[in-house]
Image (cartoon, rainbow, N blue to C red):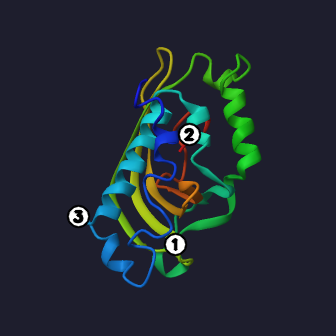
Amino acid sequence: MDDEATWPERQTGAVMSASSPGLGAAAAANCVPGAPLYGEVVEFLYREAELLDTYRFDQWIALFADDIRYVMPVRTTQFLTAGAGFHEVAFFDENLASLRTRVRRLQTEFAWAETPPSRTRHFVSNVLMDPGENANEIAVRLNFMITRTRSDRGHQLFTGLREDVLRCDESNGLKIAKRRILIDQTVISGTNLSVLF
């Protein structure tokens, strides 16, 4: 059996358990680069990127917790003294049901923005981790870059900061409980936002 094809199932309960180091009093020490927990999380992020780039959307959606909030606020240009530069308004603000609908649509011939499908490459870097608000959660910040080409059209690029909350328990392994996508562009240069972040 292809090991890569079964990775989401393999990672369930295997990446981390609720009793793993990093989910207790010594959590901060286990969130630094070089710690086993850090390596497990980075592999999780790399594997997730591979699922998106190889159109394995059903396996990708299985990585999310039931209460996922997946949001991309609108960026504005303003002075730092006026705040971080993001509106309450979002390009999208999704839950698990709406994400599943997006994925199902991408798998049909009716997703006009993705027919033919985009060719994407998801890059993640500068991964930083901290203990989450809850004992079984990890707060992850990372830089992302997504390249996109479709049909014979020009190259498109999306960059930004992503703030994820990863949750784990003994039965489910790692799950993405929250994703906040802080895109660098104030004006989206892509033809649409049909790609997944």
Mark 3 lies on residue:
34
Quadrant including the N terminus = top left
Q: Secondary structure at mark 2?
A: helix
Q: Secondary structure at mark 3?
A: loop
- Please give left or right for residue 40 compared with residue 53 in the image: left
Residue 194 visible within the image:
yes
Residue 193 figure quarter = top right
Please rate how many residues cluster around mark 2, counting C-alpha atoms within 10 Å: few if below 14, some from 14 to 19, many from 20: some
Q: Secondary structure at mark 1?
A: loop
Seen from the viewer's position, the closer of residues 176 and 105 is: 176
Mark 1 lies on residue:
84
Q: Position of residue 142 (x, y in %)?
A: 40, 59
Residue 65 figure quarter = bottom right
Of labels 3 and 1, the one closer to you: 3
Question: What's the amino acid at mark 1?
Answer: Ala
Q: Which mark is residue 75?
A: none
